[in-house]
Image: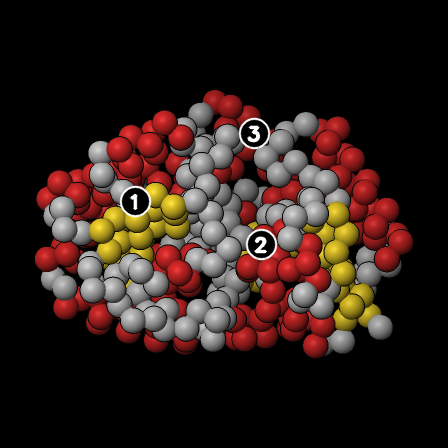
Amino acid sequence: MKKFILISPKNRTVYNFRGDLVKDIIKAGYEVVVTGPNWIDVDRIEALGARFVGIPMEKNGVNPLHDLKYTWRLYKLMKKEKPDATLGYTIKPVIYGAIAAKLAGVKNITSMVTGAGYLFTAKTTKAKVVKMIGLMLYRMGIACADRLIFQNQDDQKEFVANGLLKFEKSCIVNGSGVNMEHFAKQPLPKKITFFMLSRALYSKGVKEYLDACRIVHKKHPEVRLMFLGAVEKMPDALAWEMVQSYIDDGSIEYFPETNDVRVFTGQCSMFVLPSYREGTPRTVLEAMAIGRGIITTDAPGCRETVKEGVNGYLVPVKNAEAVAEKMCYVAEHLELIEKMGEESWKYCKEKFEVKKVNGSMLEIMQLR
């Protein structure tokens, strides 16, 4: 049997975002081996039909010795398993996964950029140094891959413009796709509710959302405002004390991470994501699939999910007042909620349904 290795940065992303892809690769006749940085939720990965191998990785660390160890362990795995094809996604698997696969003699190597993220959005001196190093490493990793998959044209153009690859070596798919049977339509809540789901990072627009909620809460105290996401100690993260201040003054209802976001997304009238940049935001696709209108930014990855004024609204990046303005407008024009939710569902079905996206992925990776 042919063998495929999926190089993952976080176990949760395998079963949450790539579960259907793993199943489709297995259906195509491959044994699938998944790597992950720890042994959390391994049973959920194995339930997909894959075999799991833990390879420790510091997702946000910049210690070169740790990254060399990660690359060496991936290389040893590749030499042992002798896969016919590999796929790595997010920065470290894209870089070190491709290098390890090339050194091990893998003949079919695919990498996927799921969003340029912090590396391209941060403007501090430290971030500029990290970007310079990151671009150098990206160049090495991409050179080892046979192809690079993007989730939007903006990221593709930026990587080409930075000399990281030739355009001909790149492809685009419509995000990770969303299983519209699992994320089925849900009835709208009786109380108008806005919701954001994200780790508490500045680059995700969380500060803008919280500020917008504070504005909306003062103007429309009858509106429910929800935020769900982990508050972590990492670069770009909001401090817990800051998030707590919005909870304390009643601007938001806060919820920690969950294993089933449908329970929370289903409680909202419209979904909000004021992110600075994305690949294609999976949280938005999930909200569209259950029939919710979208307020997001006119930014790479985000703008692909909204037909302006049809299924939602696009707002400028880093503009809490613009986010609040659209939220208030919807609160004052309730007829838009059902209309935009239905249009979101149609657009999701047309463009982002997981079977269509995975079909493109398998063809691009030359697995069928």
Mark number displayed over residue 78: none
Secondary structure under tag 1 reads: strand
Classify mark 3: residues with Cα within 10 Å, few (<14), some (14-19) or many (20+): some
Q: Quadrant of residue 186?
A: bottom left
Q: Mark 2 or 1, which is nearer the eye?
A: 1
Classify mark 2: residues with Cα within 10 Å, few (<14), some (14-19) or many (20+): few
Residue drawn at (44%, 69%), measured in percent from left and top?
183
- Pointer 2 or 1: first along the chain: 2
Specify whether 113 is left or right of 367: left
Image height check: is 325 above or below 269? Answer: above
Tell me the kind of residue under disc 3: Val
Residue 146 at least partly seen: no
In the image, farthest residue toward the right: 80
Residue drawn at (34%, 29%), measured in percent from left and top?
242
Image height check: is 262 above or below 184? Answer: above
Specify whether 62 is left or right of 280: right
Residues under labels 2 and 1: Cα distance?
Answer: 25 Å
Tell me the kind of residue under disc 1: Glu
Tell me the kind of residue under disc 2: Thr
Classify mark 1: residues with Cα within 10 Å, few (<14), some (14-19) or many (20+): some
Residues under labels 2 and 3: Cα distance?
Answer: 24 Å
Residue that badge 1 annotates: 253
Mark number displayed over residue 130: 3
Q: Mark 1 or 3, which is nearer the eye?
A: 1
Residue that badge 2 annotates: 13
Secondary structure under tag 3 reads: helix
Q: Position of residue 187 (x, y in %)?
A: 29, 71
- Pointer 2 or 3: first along the chain: 2
The N terminus appears in which quarter of the rendering? Answer: bottom right
